[in-house]
Amino acid sequence: MKKKTIVILIILIFVAIAIGAIIVKNSNKNNCMQDGIQKIKMSEVTRSVFYAPQYVAINNGYFKDCGIEIELTTGQGADAVMTSVLSGESQIGFAGPEASIYVYNEGKEDYTQVFAQLTKRDGSFLVSKEKNDNFNWSDLKGKTVIPGRKGGVPYMTLEYVIKQKGLNPKTDLKLDDSIKFDLMASAFTSGTADYVTLFEPTASNIQKLGKGYIVASVGKEAGEIPYTAYFAKKSYIQNNEKMIQEFTNAIYNNVCGAKVDLIARLGKSTIKVNELLDLKVGDIITLDTKVDGDIELDVSEARSFKCRPGLIKNKNGVVITDSVKKGV
């Protein structure tokens, strides 16, 4: 019989927090005014844990509580999302606000208008072809980076960070914007580019496969910006003002009152399955970390912190000491 091992994750504490992407008021069904159910087709720019509040609202029935049934599709890029909205295939789009600006500048009579914002930071991570535990932004000099579509928020955010770090994005490195959004990961792993910007869980998946390594958070370096927003054609908003308000209420009033688990991990140990089955009260499991040192604090699957356990106002808890990149 083959020996099997199992990783024991020692859970220190579970606490609940409100999702911090947006600021909200108390949530209840009385916030919703719409009678009956209105079906809405919505196209999102990509599928990512970065947009967890949206998925919580759909899966927990918050939209239906407000009389809205969402049919969600993934456009894989802001251009595809905008095309879907302008053609009438989708009523609501979810992408960077710059997409609506470009449509307005084209002079379209029935242009799109942004009516709500979900995220206020860039959720992408810079992934390197080579492992680099001491990454510095100056390492990009002379390298090729896949940043997404030129003119898109991810591209502009990365360009801003590069400038802030003292590099010239036009002369010090090459930003290859020829790769479509949904092909960026595969182009990076199979091509010659040195770096790429990717959302989660794609970034961590590539790292798990050993085909890339997360070296920096673009959002952490860029700070707060209007990043991803909801928009619809002007005519649609004018003809469906009540529904648009209910759509916004479903996220702002309900989702941010939702709770997620924080898991502080004391450490881990590997034992055989038969040893696990024989565990009894009083047995000691050796961990790979010191209890009096920093431990990891996971927030769902999206990000984590370093923290230190202790007593806080006579209650067991943890103090956040630093933020870390998930998967590094």
Image: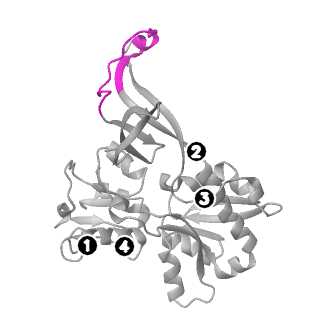
Residue named by callout 1: 163
The relative height of residue 187 versus residue 307 in the rendered view (above or below) is below
Secondary element type, mark 2: strand
Write the residue at 56% across / 60% down: 23
Region rendered in magenta: 268-293
* Separation of marks 1 and 3 at Cα, in angstroms: 34 Å
Front-most of 31 and 242? 31
First-in-chain label (2 vs 4): 4
Secondary element type, mark 3: loop
Most frequent secondary structure within the magenta stretch: loop
Residue 322, disc: none
- The amino acid pointed to by label 1 is Lys
Circle 1 packing at 10 Å, graded few (<14), some (14-19), many (20+), is few
- The amino acid pointed to by label 3 is Val
Pinpoint residue 189: horizontal percent, then vertical percent. 30, 54
First-in-chain label (1 vs 4): 4
Residue named by callout 4: 156
Q: Nearer the viewer, mark 3 or mark 4?
A: 3
Pinpoint residue 51: horizontal percent, then vertical percent. 52, 56
Q: Nearer the viewer, mark 2 or mark 1?
A: 2
* Separation of marks 3 and 4 at Cα, in angstroms: 28 Å
- The amino acid pointed to by label 2 is Lys
Write the residue at 50% across / 76% down: 99
Q: Nearer the viewer, mark 2 or mark 4?
A: 2
First-in-chain label (3 vs 4): 3
Write the residue at 54% across / 86% down: 104
Pinpoint residue 36: horizontal percent, then vertical percent. 83, 61
Residue named by callout 2: 259
Count the marks: how many?
4
Pinpoint residue 131: horizontal percent, then vertical percent. 22, 48
- The amino acid pointed to by label 4 is Met
